[in-house]
Every structure is written in C-alpha cells, then in structure tokens.
Amino acid sequence: MNAITQSITNSPSKHYHNIILGAGISGLTTAFYLQKSNKDQNFIILEKNDRVGGRVFTDTFNNNLVEHGPNALILRKKEFRDILCDLQLENELIYPPAQSKKRYICKNGKLISVSPSSLLLKSDLTDLKAKIKLLLGGYTSTPQEKIPANQNIFDFFATRFSNKFAENLIIPLVSGIYAGDARKVIMKNAFPKIYEFALNSNSLLLGAIKTLLRKKQKQQQNKQNNHKESFQANNLASFKDGLNILSNTIYKNFEKQVILNSTVTSISKDNFKKMWIIKTANESYTCKNLINTLPAISFAELLLSDDLWFNELKSYLKNINYSSVIIVHLTYNKSDIKNKNRGFGFLNTHENNLLKRPLRILGTLFSSYMFPSRTSTNQELFTVFLGGDLYPQIKQLSDKEIIDLAHTELTKILQINASIANEHSILRWDLAIPQYDQNHLQFKDWINRDENTKEYIKNNLYWSTNYWGGISVPDCMINAKNIAQNILEESI
Ligand SMILES: Cc1cc2nc3c(=O)[nH]c(=O)nc-3n(C[C@H](O)[C@H](O)[C@H](O)COP(=O)(O)OP(=O)(O)OC[C@H]3O[C@@H](n4cnc5c(N)ncnc54)[C@H](O)[C@@H]3O)c2cc1C
C-alpha cells in the first residue's frame, strides 16, 4: 500500500491508517518499522518544528559541531545494536578514545576521578561505612521482599552504602542522567536493572552476578542466532557529523510522509466511527491508530474529551513532571587551560545545595576530547549542563547571565585563563526530561492495570514516548520498534 494514495477521498479530513504525533527519534523509529514491514505503510507524522529529531539536535556554529540534546549513545543493549544494523549505520559510528571512560566528580571546585578502586582506597567521596559496604558489594539486611517499590534512588544507595556515598556520587549521577533530584526519582523505574539486582540478593554485587549468569546462559542458548557484530558494544558512540545522522537517515526513507511546521492543536476521538480526529491550524486528519510521542502534558492538554477514562488518563499525564535543562557550549584555547584532567566529563556535587551557592552548573562534558573533530585543533569545546530539578531557578536568568555563570564556574574548575570564552552557544529545553518520580510511578501503575491496558488498546492508542520504557535514545528506539510491531500484529 502506498501511504499517500490511501487517503480516503470524499472526506473533509485526510484519512490515514496511522498518525504519529511528533518526529522525534521515537516517532521516526516507529514510522521506520511500519514502513519496513511492507504491511502497513499508510502513515503520516505531524511535526511542529521545521526539522526532524526533536531532542536529538546537532548544530554547527563557526567551526564547532555541537549537540544541544543527547551527546552520545550507549551501545550496551543488543536490541539497539540490531536497530543500528537495520539502519545500516553500524559502520558509521565513531567511538571516543579509551581514556574518555574516565569520569570525574567535582567537589569543592576540585575534580576527583571516580573508579571502583579509587572509591575503595583513597577517595574522600566515600566514608569508612561506604568503603566497608563496597567490599560487601553494597549489602543491606533488608529482606528483598521488603524493598519498597517506591523507594527513591538516594535512599536505595544510602541504605546499601552510606549517606555520604549517596550525596557525593548518586545526587550528581541522577542530575547528570535525568537532570533530576535523586531524592525524588524512583529507583524501580529509573534504574530497573540495578533494582532487579537488589531483588535477587541482599548484596547488589551478588545480585548482579546472579543476573549476569542467567543472561549468559540465555545468550549461550541463542548463540546460533547471533550474527557477528562490528560494534564496540561496551562503549559510547556517536557519528562523525553528530547524532542528527540517526534521525536524518530514518527521515530520508519517508520524507513526504512527514509534515513539518504542523503543530497539532487538538486531538479527539469519534467513538461512533472509531476514528481519531487530529487538527492542526490548517488541516484536519483522521486515523485508526494514534501513536503519541508528545510530552505527557502536551498530549493531555490537546486531548479533548468528555469520556471518563480519557479524563482520568489526562489527570495522570498532567502530573508527569519534566525537568528543564539549559545547554551552554563554550570553547577556549588549549594553551589557556591549566587543568589537564580529561575523560567523559564531570558532575558537580551539591552539598551546599540551595543554601550557600544557589546557582551552579550540573556538570560538563569534555566534548572535543571525546570527539576531537568537534572544534578546531587549537581549542577545546565543552558542553555545560545547567538547571534541572536541583537548580530550576536558573531558567529565570537571561542568556547572558547563564553564559557568564557557566564560564565563571568552568574557568575556576579547569583553571582556564580567559576572561571570556572564544565562542558560545545556548539552548533552553523547557520539557527536557520526564522525571521517573512518584507521579510517574502512579501513572505507570495505573496504565498497567488490566482494565486500563484494555482501554487504550481498544482505542488504538499507542505510546512511543520517553516516559514509557526509558529516557535514553536507545530505549526510545527499542520501545518505538516494539510499538510498530504491536501495530502490525493488530492490523494483520
Ligand atoms: C539535554 C538533553 C540531553 C540528553 N542526553 C542524552 C544522551 O546523551 N543520551 C541519550 O541516550 N539520551 C539523552 N537524552 C534523552 C533523549 O534525547 C530523549 O529522551 C529522546 O530524544 C526523546 O525522543 P522522543 O522522540 O521520545 O521525544 P522528542 O524528541 O521530544 O520528540 C517529540 C516531538 O514532538 C514534537 N511536538 C511537540 N509538540 C507537538 C505538537 N503540538 N504538534 C506536533 N509536534 C509536536 C516535538 O517538536 C518533537 O519533535 C537527553 C535529553 C536532553 C533533553
């Protein structure tokens, strides 16, 4: 079937079998697998921006290649590596140098390298209690069945190591991944794998070993199905021209089916005709299957309905919190930078959170150290993250104030001798990252109840979003592929 020619004629609205809301990486990947199947290519994507990719946003200024959104992909999951093969992108990947595995915590303005041995032996990021617990593999006497399903990440690690460990390492980690607050984000949904280790044993290490052994057994059984891979699977990766390659490669397969500059203004359901009605400023569309990739709050606000179930759904979606993040890129002459500690980047501790120093950077990536061609050879490019749930008040500052703040902190930490950066850029994300907190947990518990699952299936409503099965680009793409497969199974 050809998608465009399938529009129903004699209808005031254009009709498609599938409408995907949003051309971020989730929407594009769902569309890719619908198209690849040859079974249901009757879809369009409605996208408000004049470009595809959503949060995936590579940009250039002067001689710099910068990522305003995700910076790198974690290749750990086999399902994701399979998707890269389907896109024929596996040989386009570039990898950072081995030394960039080094990560730092910035405490009191000093960079401290983080590794299991340094934490155990000499680091002042950990206390004696944490060091002993590290030797015991993160032990807790709490029986597995008593681990609260809604335990936050801070408490999860504080009980297995120590408060100091959680303050110095876990708070920065959660602000680095979720731009969130470790005291609010829920372990079970944010780090399901580690949570599973804890369910397997009182010691995290033993739990991990048990899980890995089981996984290995499974892998042995499936060995004959595995093709040889060219990936450095335990590494981070990007593409020479940035992560936009990912979205642009997918987009090229069905450009005409993506309607850019097309902001959805309302979503409703005609229950009699069993069709969704989607409106933009200039057009009205109908479809059988609606694939939502919009932020939760946006979808809830656009959905017009008197139906009780939809209204309950809306109230859960409206409660899903998002952190806002500001990304600043700065370049400096290499010769002006005294501190030569390099690696992936550093995350800030927040021990004086909101009291003595209310405005701080969350962390910084050593972008041109990881991917050297990102700036000219005589200078270094840094990507600084600000805001998040720990310092939300930063977004009230002007662009200039934020750039000054990033510059002042970075020059102090890396001992950079420069009164201003050579170049800078700034980008603000308002609904940057959904928070897997208490409200998200309540949403997931509610939507996973049988009666609610039946309801959204009955309504042909599909979730290809980053508040469903993980926030990372790989997780979004894996989830999106599964959604496409569900749609295809339903339509057979
Ligand atoms: C600053 C930052 C850094 C990150 N770093 C990493 C990283 O290093 N590695 C990693 O794996 N992940 C990272 N992530 C997470 C990851 O980028 C996102 O979770 C993922 O890209 C989300 O993709 P999506 O398609 O689900 O949503 P989005 O990218 O948000 O796509 C939704 C699309 O819907 C469109 N839209 C919204 N409203 C409307 C409307 N009314 N009508 C039509 N279209 C609309 C938007 O324009 C957008 O294109 C980062 C995220 C951010 C914000």
Image (cartoon, helix red, strand yellow):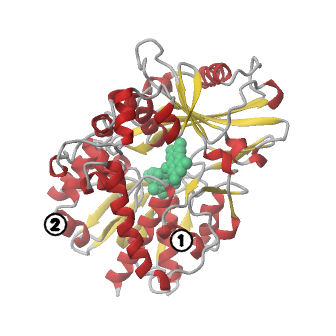
Image depth: mark 2 or mark 1 in front: 1
- Label 2 belongs to which residue? 450
In this rendered view, identify the residue nearer to me: 287 or 436: 436
Residue occupying image coordinates x 48% and y 25%: 124
In this picture, residue 76 sits left or right of residue 95: left
Q: Relative to residue 89, is residue 208 depicted above or below?
A: above
**Disc 2 residue crowd, few under 14, some 14–19, many 20+, Cα 10 Å:** few
In this rendered view, identify the residue nearer to me: 108 or 117: 117
Asked if ligand 1 lies within 8 A of label 2, the reply is no
SS under mark 2: helix
Residue 271's quadrant in the figure? bottom left
Residue occupying image coordinates x 59% and y 74%: 85
Residue occupying image coordinates x 27% and y 36%: 159
- Label 1 belongs to which residue? 83
The answer to whether residue 252 is visible is yes
Q: Relative to residue 118, is residue 475 depicted above or below?
A: below
Give the residue type that dot 2 points to: Asp
Which quadrant would the C terminus be assigned to in this image?
A: bottom left
x then y, percent, for residue 341: 68, 32
Residue occupying image coordinates x 19% and y 55%: 446
Q: Residue furthest top?
A: 356
Give the residue type that dot 1 points to: Ile
x then y, percent, for residue 155: 28, 35
Residue 17's quadrant in the figure? bottom left
Residue 173's quadrant in the figure? top left
Of the numbered discs 2 and 1, the one sitting upstream in the chain is 1
